[in-house]
Image (spheres, helix red, strand yellow):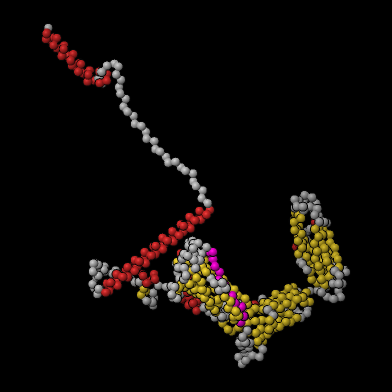
Amino acid sequence: MKQSQSILSLAGRACLVAFCASTPAWALSGPTQEPTPEPKETPVVEEKPVQKPPVQKTKEELEKEAIQKKKEAIQREQAKKDAERKAQEKAREEAKKREQSGPGRPPIGKTPPAKPVTKPVTRKPGGPILTPTDKQNSKPQTAEERAKYERMQQAKAKDIQADPGAKLQIEFGTERHDFGRLRQGDKVEHTFVMQSAGTNPLKIRQIKPSCGCTLGSVSVSDGEGNYSEYTFGDPIEPGRDIKVNAAVDTTNKKNKVQVRIQVMSNDPVGTHALTLAAEVQPFLTATPQMINFGDIPMGAERSQVVDIRTSRGEAVALNLDERRLSTLPPGVSHELTPVNPNAEGKSSHWQLRVNVGADAAEGRLSLSFRLNTDIAMPVDPEKEKMAKDKGSHIVPQFFNTTVSGSGRILGTFSVDRTYLSFGLVGPGQVVPRSVRLTCNEEGFSLDNLKVYLRGRQGKNIDDIKDLFETSIKPVPNVNAVDVELRLKGFPENKDQSFNGELVIETGYPSSPEKVVIFSGICRSGVK
């Protein structure tokens, strides 16, 4: 009995231990206790900065900020150049110390210089050996190379901005130079002098000459009277002088000549203009330069003489351009003769006689004579060298002059116009047009003229004939009449184009009729 009770007590204790192991602590403490909740993390709210409304700046403040930014950029650029200059000076001083310490000996406290690296060399055909450094620093030699070099330099300097402290000063009256009277073929030069007169360095980004002017060189002083070639975009310190050399070639110029040179810089003004002017006397002069025969009745003859001289009395040979002669109308002839020629047939005075013969055809005359001398125009040596370098040559040009002529050969009858346009008209619109017929033969009467309409190229125009009427009115004190063609008006809602021929019957055997074309358009919406 006692043994069974002990077994039961042991089993009860085992169950109690198992229950306690599986039951949470808060349940064992009693029914009134509740589980303690785990603390929750409080989210952190980021504080956003309070945005203040933007301050509106005035125009003056914005301009001051822009000026300040430009000044700071200029100062940074100047500081960079100063640092480069100091580095170069330091390198020169070290090189000088090495020379003073003796050959092969490095200065005290200095390591021996590294062995120089051999750079590849190049050679132009027939030219000197050039290292890459030489090629980079060498200046262009030919005109083509110089032009390319200038374009590259100007392209680099195009982004230069205006600086309120920069100023390009040109003394009043020196921005224009007049060479006076020159002879065709002369080549003249002039040097303009300017100055950097602001508080900040001046930068020239481009110098652009107009047609007929060549930019020679641009140089800047060092403040001691010495001048060196200027590179576009480089700063020019205040107080330094600038020289711009320009040349004018008058080979292909005559009479009044004026060329301009535009200087563009960081001066707030932007562009300054320089001017070169001259009065160029032609090598060869023709008097008159234009001959006018006026109206010539058919069958009549006319003649005019042109006087040709060299401006400085040189004896020359003259010849007429055959290509111009091939365009002369039938019935026109010419004679070119020297006055008091020398043994070689040359003279400083020539005469050109132009004749209109009786066989000249009816209509307008248009004449052109080109007279060439045997004196060749000067050639620019640089251009000639460029052509030779390219395996070509420059075709020689000779001093010359041109004489033009005009006139009209009148038939028995002439009209002041050969076409009448009615334009755009509307239904019912009345439009008159007229043409004047003149008889150039004295004694012939215009009393028996007849006028009618016909279609062009045989086309039938019976549908519009009744829309027109014609009339003839004599012109006082002249053997001429005005022939009127009047449009009486198209019917309503009529849209069509129209054309035809106005025929004037003269009754003259050799010229029985004169024809004038007419045309127009009718649209119903036009008023």
| Rendering coords of residue 374 (x, y %) | 59, 84
Depth check: 234 or 14 in front?
A: 234
> Percent x, y for residue 171?
54, 72
Residue at the spot x=45%, y=68% of the render? 237
> Residue at 61% of width from left, 87% of height from top?
314
- Find residue 221 and report its horizontal and vertical position in percent: 45, 73
Q: Residue furthest bottom?
A: 343
Tell me if residue 276 is in the magenta stretch: yes
Q: Is residue 304 above or below residue 486?
A: below
Asked if 89 appears above or below 30 in the picture, the reply is below
For image coordinates 74% across by 82% down, the residue present is 303
Q: Is residue 201 left or right of residue 259?
A: left
Q: Nearer the viewer, residue 368 or 192?
A: 192
Q: Position of residue 384 (x, y in %)?
A: 50, 78
The magenta stretch spans which residues?
269-283
Residue positioned 76% across, 66% down in the render: 418
Is residue 200 one of those drawn in magenta?
no
Judged left or right of residue 244, residue 415 is: right
Along the line of sight, which residue is nearer the eye, 421 or 236?
A: 236
| Residue 119 in which image quadrant | bottom left
Of the 4 image quadrants, the one containing the N terminus is top left
Left or right: where 337 falls relative to 28: right
Magenta: main secondary structure equals strand
